Image: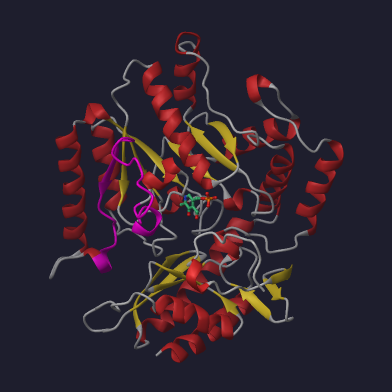
Amino acid sequence: MMSQMIYPTTNFASVETLNIVRGDGVYVYDNQGKQYLEGMSGLWCASLGFNNAELIEAAKNQMETIAYAHMFGGKTHEPGMKLADKLSSMVPVDNARVFMGSSGSDANDTQIKLLRYYFAAIGKPEKRKIIARERSYHGVTVGAACLTGLPINQTNFDLPIEALGVLRTDAPHYYRGKKDGETEAQFVDRIVGNLADLIEREGAHTIAAFIAEPITGASGVIVPPVGYYDKVQALLKQNDILFIADEVITGFGRTGNDFGVTTMGIKPDMMSFAKQLSSAYVPISASVIRGDMYDAMVEPCSKLGVFGHGYTYSGHPVACAVALKTLEIYERDNMFAKAAETGAYLQSRLQEFADHPLVGEVRGAGMIAAVELVANKETGEAFKDGKVGYFAANACQEHGLISRPVAGSSLALCPPLITTKAQIDEIVEKMGKALNDTL
Ligand code: PLP
């Protein structure tokens, strides 16, 4: 059934609808009554499944108390303040300060503005460029889309990438990016060397920050080699460049730890969150910065003028109440440790596909993974048309599993954190059938 809807991130010439009408735990059901195990948590977000009674109750209670209040100019409310304090206490950022929005894209746009304002406040307005990586995904609003490093999100939009000062550096994907005969360590040295050259060429005094997803999602679940982040961080520190961790997917137990930065050994200055912050029950995002960065903006604010950035839904009370309840459930139910255990099981079961004739690489961490599908297993040669991921995802769907084609030739999994080991077995069984169908 078609409607007047303009579908997001969709080929308008071949819209294939799947009408989902209800959810129950990790399962969803279409309008024909067919059951699917939701192996993607929707879009990497519904960590607590699709009908959690406590989250529904939290939203209802907050709507009954006060359904909307804003935060411009210091107007405030309990769920907003409590959420900011709770998040600040959880993140590995010193004395973290929290700005709220509604989406991962707006969280990253906010980071761009916070950077500009901060460097203006400390008298370094020329420090404004941001280094982002090839094959990164940071969202689709104009600012975030400039940071993103995927052609699909940039082609046809004439984005002001240069005007915004976005610089591009290598994706840390050894399997796809290595040169003939190059070891993992040599690959890391080469791409970090390229980063060093870029900084040298542009001048460190013009570069504000480096942004990275600790482990990527939409670009194919790239887990950088050991040593990559250590070397990148040393280089950034040496050049006084801040590290923004885009944790929109990796935040809150996804990668086998509380945050992706913990899994990858990163000490960030700024962090972006959305998705699992509220288990996706209501839209909410958070842009986190070091406390001393906030402090440095306070006095100059009277000279610079008001920080003129805020959304109608910044700190929406219903979203804050649901996010608070989500964080409470994560803590009370020891969710991150449980997901780490289930995630280790998922990774070990997926390794069974390493021998499959269609699979070039199996990669992931915790409860996020991808298998890369290749035309030639020996050489790693990619399929020319880049559609194999779509065929495999469709085959999964036939077997009652929702997965996601990413970067054309990979198939991603990102199951809800509440998924059981028996349900992981179900995912692997359905995926195995789908890969055989795709051969
Ligand atoms: N950053 C990352 C790492 C993401 O994966 C996404 C979305 O998938 C975004 C930002 C953008 O989030 P949103 O779609 O909520 O704008």
> Who is closer to the viewer here, 158 or 389?
158
**Could one spot residue 425 in this view of the protein?**
no
Classify 207 as above or below 176.
above
Q: Is the magenta stretch mostly helix, strand or loop?
A: loop
Q: Residue lying at the far top in this picture: please name it.
A: 303
Instruction: Identify the residue shown where x is 52% and y is 65%.
Output: 367
Quadrant of the rendering where the C terminus is positioned: bottom left
Instruction: Identify the residue shown where x is 26% and y is 64%.
Output: 174
Rendering quarter of residue 360: bottom left
Q: Residue lying at the far left in this picture: please name it.
A: 181
Magenta span contains residue 190: no
Q: Residue lying at the far right in this picture: please name it.
A: 64
Instruction: Identify the residue shown where x is 64% and y is 37%.
Output: 86
Residue 16 x %, y %: 56, 75
Residue 17 x %, y %: 60, 73
Rendering quarter of residue 285: top right
Classify 157 as above or below 364.
above
**Count of numbered circles in the view:** 0
Classify residue 175 as left or right of residue 424.
Answer: left
The magenta span reads: 149-176
Instruction: Identify the residue shown where x is 62% and y is 61%.
Output: 5
